[in-house]
Image: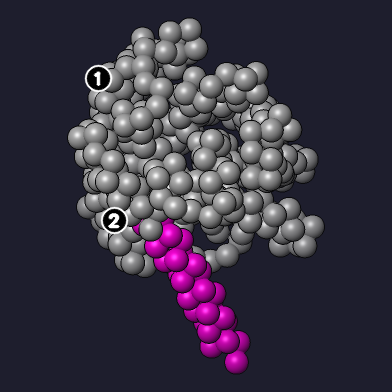
């Protein structure tokens, strides 16, 4: 990979990592842990940092790389979003940061428009709907609306991006027309609920919760992970991440139906983190060994060490969720702290694996070319 291609990618990846660390620090500060002054100043933008800054930039980068052979300018979309994330760290809540992130989400929607033009399919359209939700959520936030009004649109961006990809991969099982219709129905129910939240938060959250439950049931029934969990190695690990994530998606949907409109506090945290930590980060854990080589060109070998952070993620999130359900501040605080430590362990295992993989690659090359 040439320097002109590598430099912007490394800037984006570095920004993604910094946004993640800033999001984790601000999350601990929100829970009441004594953090540094920077983390304290980011308390109000914890959600935007994690969703738009970290995950939004990462997804923009994935799509830009996929289209880079046809559209070289596509790399500017994740760069703009990454600059927005940097501005969010430097000037929390500023119009400039919000504007750049909104521009980045508009750029992602354009990229999906190009993808639909090149490969029109249901899965790409669903992912495009997700990017539209992100753009609408960012626009509401830019216009001065509270985060609790935008956050469900942001969550829809992530959920629809993931389930769209899973629909594409599930075609390997040769889905019947009925099973595809069931998937579309569940997605439509979810989308209706998400859009209704703009006008009526309580009704919208409950409808989207029903959609999330139905989507999770469909994924647990039809996703190829049901087969690959019976295999070995990387395929089995990814399947374990996916299936456990689908359970959290269903749980988040159940809590959304039960709790309805929530604006802050225990119930708010319960619903959001079931979706964002339980579902989304399970997907990240499972796909990192695929995403990282695609973005950096680095070889990353699978190791069973990845099961350690995966198991810890679910244990610590159960602890945190129990604290929210019991309205226990200490239990929620400790659960949140262990969540962050789990993510740091995952980063550590990933870095260790990258280093080992490069050493193994060089050793193999030397042996083949003495």
User: Is residue 70 or residue 35 the one in the foreground?
Assistant: 35
- Asked whether 216 or 176 is in front, the reply is 216
Q: Earlier in the sequence, mark 2 or mark 1?
A: 1
Disc on res. 258: 1
Q: Residue furthest bottom?
A: 370
* Vertical side of 56 occupied by 188: above or below: above
Q: Residues within 10 Å of mark 1 (few under 14, many from 20)?
A: few
Would you say residue 237 is visible in this rendering? no
Residue drawn 57% across and 65% down? Answer: 298
- How far across and how far down the image is residue 90, in percent? 68, 45
Instruction: Residue 235: give x, y in percent of width and height.
Output: 34, 55
Pick whichever, 143 or 204, lies toward us: 143
Q: Is residue 170 left or right of residue 79?
A: left
Residue 6 is left or right of residue 33, and the answer is: right
Residue that mark 2 sits on: 312
* Inter-mark Cα distance, 2 to 1: 27 Å
Residue 137 lies in the magenta stretch = no
In the rendered view of the protein, which quadrant contains the N terminus? bottom right
Q: Is residue 368 magenta?
A: yes
Secondary structure beneath dot 1 equals helix
Q: Relative to 39, say whether 222 is above or below.
A: above
At horizontal 41% and vertical 50% (from top left) the residue drawn is 33
Q: Nearer the viewer, residue 174 or 23?
A: 23
């Amino acid at each position: 990979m040439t320097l002109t291609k590598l430099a912007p990618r490394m800037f984006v990846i570095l920004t993604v990592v910094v946004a993640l660390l800033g999001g984790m620090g601000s999350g601990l500060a929100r829970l009441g842990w004594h953090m540094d002054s920077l983390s304290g100043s980011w308390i109000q933008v914890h959600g935007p940092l994690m969703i738009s800054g970290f995950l939004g930039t990462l997804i923009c980068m994935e799509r830009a790389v996929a289209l880079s052979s046809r559209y070289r300018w596509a790399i500017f979309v994740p760069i703009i979003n990454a600059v927005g994330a940097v501005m969010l760290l430097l000037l929390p809540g500023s119009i400039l940061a919000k504007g750049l992130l909104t521009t980045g989400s508009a750029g992602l929607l354009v990229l999906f428009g190009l993808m639909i033009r090149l490969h029109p399919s249901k899965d790409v359209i669903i992912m495009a709907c997700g990017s539209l939700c992100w753009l609408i959520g960012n626009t509401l936030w830019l216009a001065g609306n509270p985060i609790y009004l935008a956050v469900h649109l942001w969550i829809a961006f992530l959920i629809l991006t993931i389930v769209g990809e899973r629909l594409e991969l599930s075609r390997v099982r040769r889905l019947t027309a009925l099973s595809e219709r069931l998937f579309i129905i569940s997605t439509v129910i979810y989308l209706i609920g998400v859009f209704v939240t703009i006008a009526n938060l309580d009704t919208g959250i409950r409808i989207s919760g029903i959609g999330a439950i139905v989507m999770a049931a469909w994924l647990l029934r039809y996703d190829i992970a049901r087969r690959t969990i019976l295999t070995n190695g990387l395929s089995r690990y990814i399947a374990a991440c996916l299936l456990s994530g689908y359970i959290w998606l269903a749980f988040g949907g159940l809590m959304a139906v039960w709790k309805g409109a929530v604006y802050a506090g225990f119930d708010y945290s319960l619903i959001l983190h079931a979706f964002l930590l339980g579902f989304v980060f399970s997907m990240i854990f499972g796909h990192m060994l695929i995403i990282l080589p695609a973005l950096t060109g680095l070889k990353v070998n699978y190791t069973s060490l990845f099961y350690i952070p995966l198991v810890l993620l679910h244990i610590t999130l159960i602890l945190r969720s129990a604290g929210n359900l019991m309205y226990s501040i200490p239990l929620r605080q400790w659960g949140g702290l262990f969540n962050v430590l789990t993510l740091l362990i995952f980063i550590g295992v990933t870095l260790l694996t990258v280093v080992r993989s490069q050493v193994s690659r060089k050793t193999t090359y030397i042996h083949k070319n003495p």
